[in-house]
Image (spheres, coloured by chain):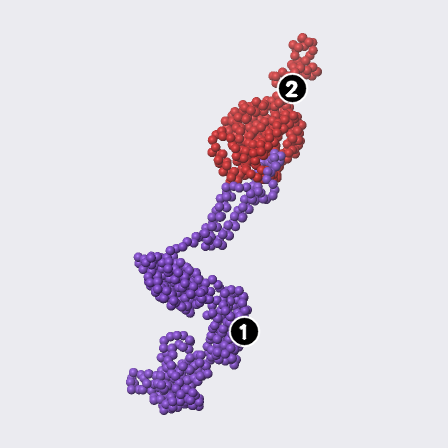
Amino acid sequence: VTFASPAALWLALLAAPIIALHMLRPRRPPVEVSSTFLWREVSKPVSSATPWQRLRPNVLLALQLLAVLLLALAAARPARATGTPLARHTVFIVDTSGSMAALDGQPDRLAAAKGKAAALRRQLPTGGVASIVVAGAEPRALLSASADAAAFGHTLDRIQTEAGTPDYATTFSLAESLETPGVPAGFVFLSDGELTTDEARLLPPGTRYVKVGSRVTNRAITALRVDPGGSGLHATVTVRNTGGPAATQVLRLDVDGRTAARQSLTLTPGATVTRQVDLPSGDRVDAFLEGEDLLAADNHAFAVTARRRALRVLLAGPDDIFVQQLLAASPGVTVVRSPVATAAPGFDLVVYDGVAVPAERDGRRRGGGHGRATGGDPGQGQRRAPRRPRPVQRRHRRGAEAGRPGRRCPRRCRRDSPAHPGQPGQPTLRLLRLRPGPQQPGRPSGVAHPR
Amino acid sequence: VTLLDPALLARLEALQLGTRRPLAGFVSGEHRSRRHGASLDFADYREYHPGDDFRRIDYHLFARLDVILLKLYEAEEDLHLRILVDTSASMALSGKLATAERVAAALGFVALTRRDPVSVHTFPLDRPAPRFVGRGAVPTFFQHLESLAATGTTDFVAAVSHLLARPGPPGLTVVLSDLLTPEWEPALSRLPARGSDVVIVHVLAPDELDPMLAGSTDAAGPRRRRRRRRNARRPEGTPKTQPIATGDVELVDRETGARVAVSVTTDAMARYRQVAAAWLTRVEQRCHQVGATYVRILTDESLEAVLLTAWRRQGVLR
């Protein structure tokens, strides 16, 4: 027998004051009489003057102690662990949150969860079916009411840990939706136990919770902020000892791939340490917490510097107020209009809108330099032409500036554009392709750069 | 008249106060006096002295003995009744003061109907001692008795000294008290010093003789009141067996506030009964030694039965 709330057994200590009250002599109640004249000769109290007396067993005391004992036992919620057979339709809910990558499994918690799920799958009753629901940021059912053990195993193998906060509410709703009428369903939740109280309430009734992972030793970089500071960068790194004993680890900061600073940190249990570090200028700052702990994923963080310089944009072509306003709305952008397509030295971006691209573009195409194509930096293009006669044009996804996967970007840009972090030191030039408007079907396509 | 039942008063009218010996009165009355007077009852002879009334010479005796002797007759005078009522705080419990008032009213009524003067004294000595004479003073006498309240401490010796110092014929002194004071004995010893006839009326509550009789105090707590109600439902004739309290108690003296720790056990109760019985015996013996009449009345006794039977046997009333 175990107790769900063993701390409530402290209530049994209430028996102590009860026993003390029984040992205390009752205070002599005053009784008024006409005169104590005759009583003085009888005044030989049986009890002594000490406030304590020997504890005599009596029924009232026994009943009070029994009541306290029962109260403490009831509050401790005694329970008996019994093996519950799996339902004919068992839904396995596998937690794929980042913490499942902790290395206290074989090799990690997710692998341990898979192993336990496979073992439980073998305990299904004859004719039983199993479903698998992944509890991640985007919950999904990978297997639905399948009696195929091999498919179950293959599905388990495909499960990987995911970044982001798992959506348990949706996960549990999805798991309950897999319930089929007429077939008793059961739920097995394999997780390392990071549910909050509110999330735990959402668990389907009768869910069997299978815990994986046992250790809590981990240190993590919880925040990294990089701001311009002086002639370089100023980084603020927050490191936390989320569990385990005190430890001393090295915090390494790389700027554009080169180690710029190393600091030793001593982290007491539960402590949060914030360090301010001045770094040389660069585009990307990576912070590493060296050493091994339970979860390697949170030992690395990176930040992209918010460097921004003024851009001069040449808008060549007839008046197009929309494009002009669009460009002018961007901070730090200076738009210069030109009714005709012309070479534009000194501009960071040239937009040919409804006009033919000047002949110099061919030369740039051959030479491969943007600056020369726009007339902005012909010398650089000439120098780079022999090394890169034809720069590779690649499509990238929209939102790449923020490092997020997404839809394809409608623009076609060079990969070495500053819009793509992680390529420092490359020449910067924005190229824009403008589609002709529907009222000007004959206008050539506004390809902003050669192919 | 609320102190006494009219029927009882009617029966008391036929009685008169009794004394153990003739007492000199102040005026002519209905009681034998130590003096010789002009009643019809022959008392004695004495020698003739010049100036004596010739009519009182017993000539038959002179003819036989040749001696001139005068016939003396008993005198009948009034009897001054002095009632000394204990109004200390100890008399407040168990209705002892009320019983004392009723006894005093009965004795005083008997005296007043015989035209005997009655004076009421109290102790503590903080109240006046009015004197009543004649049947017409009965209502006033009763009102005075009803106005008595039980407060203060018992100063028995001082009260007796004060009573003895008052002028007047010896008369009959009736003391109504519970005598629950250590100085009861010297006070009793001094009472007959003036030559008066003394009657000690010992007013007691039943639970003062036997503490196993519970529910007798007015200051009873809830437990005692419940016990009292239980006793009230008890069938007639069933002896009360509940003690004054149970366990360890602290008895508080109503009069002095003194506290005595007592463990109410069967042995303690038995011992108390022994002490009380011995004390009663001592009081009674002391009364006999000093020539006082000792009568005892319990608060739960019928006053009519006590007055008309027991006290008549003892000569207090005739």
- Residues packed near mark 2 inside 10 Å, few (<14), some (14 to 19) or many (20 plus): some
User: Same chain for the residues at labels 2 and 1, yes or no?
Assistant: no
The amino acid type of the residue labelled 2 equals His
Q: Is residue A209 left or right of residue A51?
A: left
Please provide percent x and percent y for residue B133.
58, 28
Depicted B78 relative to depicted A299: above or below: above
Please provide percent x and percent y for residue A186.
36, 58
In the rendered structure, the colour chosen for chain A is purple
Tag shown at residue A263: 1
Please provide percent x and percent y for residue B139.
54, 31
Looking at the image, which is closer to me, B251 or B139?
A: B251
- Residues packed near mark 1 inside 10 Å, few (<14), some (14 to 19) or many (20 plus): few
Residue annotated with mark 2: B36
The chain holding disc 2 is B
The amino acid type of the residue labelled 1 equals Gln
Marks 2 and 1, how far apart in space?
138 Å
Q: Residue at x 61, y 23 (%)?
A: B19
Please provide percent x and percent y for residue A183.
32, 57
Chain that is coloured red in the picture = B
